Image (cartoon, helix red, strand yellow):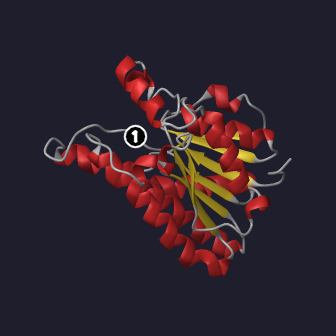
Amino acid sequence: MRLKNKVAIVTGAGSGIGKKIAEEFLKEGASVVFSDLLEDNEEIENLGENAKYIKCDVSSSKEVNTLISKTIEIFGGLDVVVNNAGIGSLGGVTDVSDEDWQKVIDINLSGSFYGIRDAAKEMKKNGTKGSIINISSILGGVGFKGALSYCASKGGVVQLTRASALDLAGEGIRVNAIAPGFIETNMTKDVLNDDDFNSMVKSSTPLGYVGEPKDIANAAIYLASDQSKYVTGTIIYVDGGWTAR
């Protein structure tokens, strides 16, 4: 088991990519805190003694700090953080309201920053050579019409990852990001159910099909494990070849 004896936090783990990452971490031997916005989650608490649920709104620095301190209190340490919590957003440059813009930036970008900063503080304090994994997107590296806020937030995550990796390399703390292509989740269900959009996605993806959450979880396991001990500041595109075009 590649993550035996490691303690991990996965935000946005109530469903979709985050849930699959957290579940696969458990299978690999980690103790895992699933975090999301629900007050409680009985399904997760029933996964066994190595799985815990903690509510957290990542747009609040106070709540992220509490999430990390509670995790350490429960499991005695922290080795891996996956900053996965995020929201989608549609709207072009003249359509996005101040409120919509701020909400996307607060959750997708600031939430990742709080997770990196507070996890790194604890890892440095305890001498832990940890792994921090951010979830960006192909739209953090390429433009996409009508998704201005989302593209900007995920592009920010890419640069946040690179700069943080340089800041923390001396401590042996690695920071990397995964940039998924279009993945079948509740967040993408509506757009992928549109025949024209679905055809566009598949025709734009060299492998010719939409990915699944486990594709992202597999990359996260690699980055969380000691197999990637010489990897930091890297963006791994798991996109079926979208960004190779």
- Asked whether, in this view, residue 86 is left or right of residue 122, the answer is left
Horizontal arrangement in the rendering, residue 62 relative to residue 79 (left or right): left
Instruction: Determine the residue located farthest toward the left in the rendered image.
Output: 94
Where's residue 72, x and y in %?
A: 68, 57
Q: Place residue 203 in its image quadrant.
A: top left
- In the rendered image, is residue 119 in sight? yes
Q: Residue at x 57, y 33 (%)?
A: 211
| Category of crowding for the residue at label 1, using alpha-carbon neighbours closer than 10 angstroms: few (below 14), some (14–19), many (at least 20) | few
Residue 77 vs 32, above or below: the answer is below
Q: How many discs appear?
A: 1
Q: Is residue 197 above or below residue 93?
A: above
Residue 47 in the image: state x and y as whole percent.
74, 31
Q: Choose between 99 and 35: the one closer to the eye.
A: 99
From this viewpoint, is residue 14 visible? no
Farthest residue to the right: give it: 1
Circle 1 residue: 87
Q: Residue at x 44, y 54 (%)?
A: 111
Residue 182 position (above or below residue 101): above
Q: Quadrant of the rendered structure where residue 48 is?
A: top right
Front position in the image: 220 or 108: 220
| Residue in the picture at 84% in, 51% down | 4
Query: What element does badge 1 sit on?
Result: loop
Which of 75 and 104 lies nearest the eye of the viewer? Answer: 104
Amino acid found under the numbered disc labelled 1:
Ile
Task: Pinpoint residue 64: horizontal percent, then vertical percent.
Answer: 50, 55
